[in-house]
Image: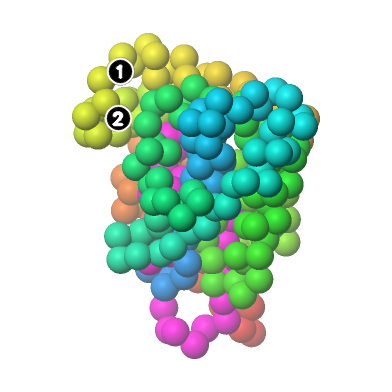
Amino acid sequence: MPTGHRKIIIAIDGYSACGKSTLARSLAKRLRYLHVDSGAMYRAVSLYVLEHKVNHRDVDEMQQALNHINIHLSFEKDGQVTWLNNENVESAIREPRINEIVSDVSTLSNVRKAMVAQQRRMGKEKGIVMDGRDIGTVVFPEADLKLFLVSALEVRVERRWLELQNKGIDVSKEKVKENLLLRDQIDSTRSDSPLRKAEDATEIDTSYLTPDEQLQIAYDLARSVIAREVE
């Protein structure tokens, strides 16, 4: 992709373990765009809640905690690094204990407002691929290209289980399935920016597509949008 092409915003939403981050990271690299995994920000808030024993169900207590939370992202050769109060927490936010609380924390209105404001600032210059669960509907409803990933549940369970095994985390497939279903329910029914497909999003079923096949589909769609932008 030529470096001088007009830059766009690409929003990738969908369910957990559908390959959102993998696709977003690969697409951003191919387009020479910035990739932002928005979920990492909610995981960082969740880490703070756990480590400081914050009662996240108490609105005032949670707001006080947010006043002491500073999250920023850096972008290195190997990808995004998440920092919480100047500490690299990229590994810590991927631990299973975070999975147990992140959906609850991410439903909180004050948390979402704080994270969305930061995410929107990141997209001001365009040339960004951001993945999450409300990017095309809330964060960037004006995104130039919106993709919504879905996948069969059994495939998602297998993917997440293998991901955890590769990280040395021993967990049963049944536990992984329970966690995925719980997150789906919480994220789809929350009152503040629930997970849903934007009306103008293109749905991609990743169940039986290889990462390379997913990337080619997304890249072709991006090229088509960019071509229209420069006409």
Res. 171 mark: 1
Q: Nearer the viewer, residue 194 or 168?
A: 168
Res. 216 mark: none
Q: What's drawn in magenta, residue-wise?
A: 1-29
Question: Is 206 one of the magenta-colored residues?
Answer: no
SS of the residue at dot 2? helix
Quadrant housing the N terminus: bottom left
Q: Quadrant of residue 94?
A: top left
Q: Nearer the viewer, residue 202 or 73?
A: 73
- Residue in the picture at 36% in, 59% down: 79
Q: Nearer the viewer, residue 34 or 26?
A: 34
Q: Is residue 90 visible?
A: yes
Q: Give how far across and how far down residue 43 sits, in percent.
A: 51, 39
Q: Give how far across and how far down residue 48 sits, in percent.
A: 53, 37
**How many C-alpha atoms fall within 10 Å of the one at disc 1: few (<14), some, or many (≥20)?**
few
Q: Quadrant of residue 142?
A: bottom right
Q: Give how far across and how far down residue 192 sits, in percent.
A: 76, 35
- Residue in the picture at 63% in, 57% down: 119
In this view, which residue lies farthest toward the top?
Answer: 174
Mark 1 residue type: Val
**Above or below, comparing residue 189 to residue 80 in the picture:** above
Sooner in the amino-acid sequence: mark 1 or mark 2: 2
- Residue in the picture at 68% in, 46% down: 67
Q: Give how far across and how far down residue 25 sits, in percent.
A: 40, 57
- Cβ–Cβ below 8 Å for labels 1 and 2? yes
Instruction: Identify residue for label 2.
Output: 164
- Residue in the picture at 59% in, 47% down: 69
Mark 2 residue type: Leu
Distance from disc 1 to disc 2, alpha carbons, whole Å, reads 8 Å
Quadrant housing the C terminus: bottom right
**How many C-alpha atoms fall within 10 Å of the one at disc 2: few (<14), some, or many (≥20)?**
some
